Amino acid sequence: MRIAFCTLGCKVNQYETQALEQLFAGRGHTLVPFEGEADVYIVNSCTVTAVSDKKSRQVVRQARKRAPDAVVALCGCYPQTHPEDIRQLPVDLVAGTGDRLKFVELVERAWAERRETITALDDAMKRRTFEPLPAGGLEGRTRAMLKVEDGCVNFCTYCIIPYARGPVRSLPLRDAAAQAAKLAQEGYRELVLTGIEISSWGHEFRDGSSLIDLVEAVCAAAPGCRVRLGSLEPRTITEAFCQRAAKLDNLCPHFHLSMQSGCDATLKRMNRKYDTARFFESVGLLWKYFQTPVPAITTDMIVGFPGETEEEFVQSLDFIQRCAFAAMHIFPYSKRPGTPAASMPDQVPRAVKEERARLAAETAARMERRYLEQWDKVEVLFEEERDGLWWGHTTRYCKVGVKSGERLHNQLRQVSVTGVGDGYLEGELLNLENR
């Protein structure tokens, strides 16, 4: 079969799509672009916002219109949490977020039988084991994602994901280290530890294991690779965590702390497990232990959460400037049916949410520019050539573009910074040996 993928959403979805690509290719199938002709179109969906749901529906309908006789399969978080919505979509196979090996078999069955729609949805809350999947990809990528955890039990009042992914399940430390070593041997220069809530890694083992144990093992198993952490719950950052992390030469000093709001009252309504004082304690610890040079601390922020007053929003704006984030993702609150926040009083009008998102984004852009302006020389792992420039990222995930007649893919090179663009650095290659 010719199989095409469209992946929506987070790095976990991207990882799982890459794993599925390997599984299908291993069974003799051919991968083709989603925009072209295919026998099977697979949409790996996201449901973190209402916009994500809409996008999933649009992509499914586009695939069906493009190829009326092809198999269209929808998997991921959207059908897992909204199975009733899928009845109206022109799909041949519906699956959720679990049992990817069975999903491969069901795709083959749907192609062979061409009968009624196949539905394969389980109860995510009953899952208890981590599903191992092949890491890495089939193309010449520079960065490999390594999924080390699945599930979440935080139950923030705005979030549907715990219902889509179930309780915490962790990849055993020995298996994670083995996968990291294998990826390094395959030529990857950077590994990204990802999961739904990687700060919870190892909690179900009940043996005292924590994320820093995993990070140390992965860094030791792949000493020639950068190791980058995915999104962290702020309380992960403790004195002990920083003391151990700062000793790891190949750990990227880039820490994405999931904030969501800079107002204590809003954080409480969100059912977040920290307040702004505890969050800022984490920021201060990172500044203390990764000060030469300064680390990149990035975050997410939701504006217009139910009950958020103008005063509370201003508090959030003041707080993010105090934290001096290197970059931010700003989201207007999106109502998710089935979550406590969806039925909270004092829902904020759309126009107000959009205006607050604009103001927050302007503040974030100013902070990002200040962060970028401090660099005069950086080491860059180059990934792709686009629009006449080679693009890559520093250890702090600053995006860098340079002009070069060389093929720079998967090379680590020193770059002299010549300017700051809109969210990226401009530079020139220094005439040094490749690393």
Image (spheres, helix red, strand yellow):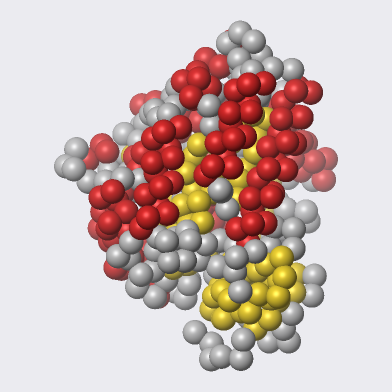
The one nearer the camera, 320 or 6, is 320
| Residue at image coords 57%, 81% | 414
Query: In the image, is 288 to the left or to the right of 417?
Result: left
The one nearer the camera, 33 or 236, is 236
Where is residue 381, by image quadrant? bottom right
The one nearer the camera, 317 or 101, is 317
Query: In the image, is 221 to the left or to the right of 139?
Result: left
Task: State whether residue 258 is above or below residue 354.
Answer: below
Residue placed furthest toward the top: 345
Residue placed furthest toward the right: 65
Query: In the image, is 410 to the left or to the right of 278?
Result: right
Instruction: Report how many numbered discs are placed on residues in the image.
Output: 0
Q: Quadrant of the N terminus?
A: bottom right
| x and y, in percent, of residue 238 in the image | 31, 45
Q: Is residue 364 visible?
A: yes
| Residue at image coords 52%, 44% | 323
Query: In the image, is 319 to the left or to the right of 275?
Result: right
| Residue at image coords 16%, 42% | 207
| x and y, in percent, of residue 376 in the image | 61, 74
| Residue at image coords 43%, 37% | 279
| x and y, in percent, of residue 49 in the image | 64, 30
Task: State whether residue 29 is above or below residue 408.
Answer: above
Task: State whether residue 121 is above or below residue 320.
Answer: above
The one nearer the camera, 420 or 354, is 420
Q: Is residue 49 visible?
A: no
Task: State whether residue 426 is above or below residue 348.
Answer: below
